[in-house]
Image (spheres, rainbow, N blue to C red):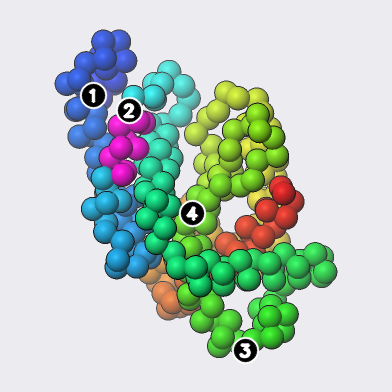
Amino acid sequence: MSNLEALWQEFKLSGSKIAKDKLLVEYSKLVKYIADRIGYSLPASVDKNDLISSGIIGLIKAVETFDPERDIKFETYASHKIRGAILDELRTLDWVPRSVRSKSRQLQKAYASLENDLGRTPYDDEVCAHLDITEKEYERMLADVAPTTILSLEEALPSRSSDSKELTLIDTIEDPGSENPLAILGYAEVKRILKEAIQSLPEKEKLVVALYHFEELTLKEIGVVLDISESRVSQIHSKTILKLRAKLLQQMG
């Protein structure tokens, strides 16, 4: 038995505070990693120390509620809790200006409307025509809403039933393992919709989503991989996430 396994056993059997503190120290780097990754694209006005403090609360909850007997890695389970705690803090701060939220909704509605009319994912020029804006104005809108789309996979989906667990878009990608059958059904449905939506994306957009949300590369690192600028990666990511959100909310609403 490894030292880490012994710590988990000691904490779960006896509730040892010493074992718990050692586990928190062992996994503390995970908090900084997630806080850094989330904070990377946020305005300078958002204090990263606040994100780390909130993330620690999420880590504590993860250690307290994790079941080592279940077939899931603690890092996966804890990442979900840490992200959730950090995003709760960001929602409390209400750091996104109303004008940015308005632009995000405007773009999302445009994607949903065009998808419905065309029966496929719209092209950039079609979105520009729909909104009666130039390509440069469209690019500026994508740049303005970029911070919200970085976090958009964490935002809550509307629940179809008051009895069902609230789903977040990140849950459709990384299910921490729920025993609630209603939640499992929800996950399955949203995963199906999301998979189909991603498959309909152009190759470059699919790649950006995969590298950022699955491989956990930063936008700068993705730019190096694709040999394009970080700002261009940000634009691609923004419009891709808005497309996915429009499709998901349209079908789940």
Q: Could you tell me how far apart the alpha carbons at marks 4 and 2 are, in whole angstroms?
A: 24 Å
Lower position in the chain sequence, tag 1 or tag 4:
1
Q: In the picture, residue 175 is in which quadrant? A: top right
Residue, disc 2: 63
Q: For mark 4, does the 10 Å Cα neighbourhood hold few (<14), some (14 to 19), or many (20 or more) residues? A: some
Instruction: Evaluate whether residue 19 shows in this view.
Output: yes
Image quadrant where one finds the N terminus: top left
Residue, disc 1: 20
Tell me the tag on residue 213.
4
Q: Amino acid at mark 3?
A: Thr
Q: Secondary structure at mark 1?
A: helix
Q: Position of residue 129 (x, y in %)?
A: 72, 84
Question: Which mark's residue is nearer the viewer, 1 or 4?
Answer: 1
Q: Is residue 35 above or below residue 231?
A: above
Q: Is residue 100 above or below residue 59?
A: below
Q: Position of residue 154 (x, y in %)?
A: 50, 50
Q: Could you tell me how far apart the alpha carbons at marks 1 and 4 are, in whole angstroms?
A: 30 Å
Based on the picture, tell me whether residue 174 belongs to the magenta stretch: no
Q: For mark 2, does the 10 Å Cα neighbourhood hold few (<14), some (14 to 19), or many (20 or more) residues? A: many
Is 55 left or right of 176, judged from the image as shown? left
Label 1 near label 2: C-beta < 8 Å? yes
Which span of residues is magenta-colored? 54-63
Q: Position of residue 185 (x, y in %)?
A: 68, 32
Q: Secondary structure at mark 4?
A: helix
Lower position in the chain sequence, tag 4 or tag 3:
3
